[in-house]
Image (tube, rainbow, N blue to C red):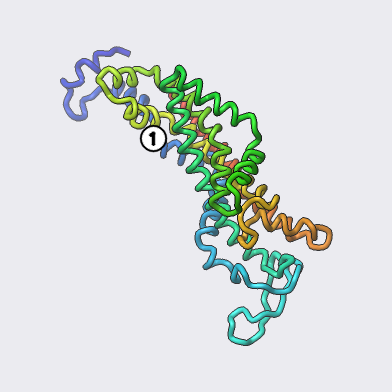
Amino acid sequence: MSTDFGENRGTYGPGEMPAEYEQSEAVEEYKSTRQRLVEGVLRDKLALFGAIVIVLFVLTAALAPVIAPYGEEETFGFMKEPGSSSQADVDGDGQVEQVFHPLGTDSFGHDILTRLIYGARVSLLVALATLALAFTLGTAIGILAGYHGGWIDSLLMRYVDFQWAFPELILGVAIIALSGGLGVVNVVIAIGIAYIDDFARLIRGEVLSIREEEYIMAAQTVGMSDRRIMIKEILPNAVAPLIVQATLMIPLAILAEAGLSFLGLGVKPTTPTWGLLLSDGRQFISEAWWISVMPGLAIMLTVLAFNMFGDGLRDAFDIDEGEVEAR
């Protein structure tokens, strides 16, 4: 294609631009990150299914007090089977009425469906807070190491390698032991620190590639500060893999919280979580299987949905980059 169109573009009036030039200009347009996300999810049915489940999960957590059939601390008959009923004064009007338990009750008489709905709030809170902590610290370490290189890179990445050698759950247990107590805050800190290395290694690899681009060299030439280059130039161009990593880390955080709670090292025993339901039901697995199976299914479905959604986003970014290279 001749480049005369670019040199003489100003000589053409409205509507007089050659079609060949307009077409080539349209082909070279880059899709925004939002467009990639939307098109990727709509293209992949499994990713769309995962997105729907995630939306339902978030709505369930946000509207738990509204949609839960009973209060989180209300008790009924002990270890009622799924689909059974019991007698209780739910309204507090002194009249005993029949209440339905679609998923049964646990060993304390709590309605399992109600506990699952309220447990979703804790799982979502822990997942998002953990993601924010790991994303912030891990991204900062990765950008600093990749951009500056030298002894800064060696020092930071040796720490990351040291942390990489420990399984996340074991590291989380150690951090909770050092913090000296149970609770949501300690769980978030433990899991968040345990997953810093994932973001650090990922963003460092991206920065090593991006820092060699011409626009980074131009920014350095005009005297832009290193801090502004890292925040304004490098980070926005490395956001795609970070988004994918974030969606894949949320289910890991949910599993980690459930694992710590199952071991008795997570939140306080009075807090309704899926992990505690699993732990409470293990000693009754032969006579009340539903106490452990129901929260286990909830965890499995949520983790599967996030993994499907994350895989769809990763494929969407890969496809889009492949199309740009082909063009």
Residue for point 26% across, 21% down: 223
Helix, strand or loop for disc 1? loop
Q: Is residue 120 depicted above or below 231 in this figure?
A: below
Near mark 1 (Cα within 10 A), the count class, few <14, some 14-19 or many ≥20, is few
- Outermost residue toward the bottom? 94
Q: Which residue is mark 1?
A: 32
Q: Is residue 310 depicted above or below 213 in this figure?
A: below
Image coords of residue 95 (percent x, y): 63, 87
Is 237 displayed left or right of 25 in the figure? right
Nearest to the observer: residue 295 or residue 8: 295
Type of amino acid at the residue the image marks with label 1 = Ser
Image coords of residue 184 (percent x, y): 56, 53
Q: Is residue 307 depicted above or below 1 in this figure?
A: below
**Residue 174 shows in the view:** yes
Residue for point 43% across, 26% down: 144
Image coords of residue 148 (percent x, y): 41, 21
**Residue 46 shows in the view:** no
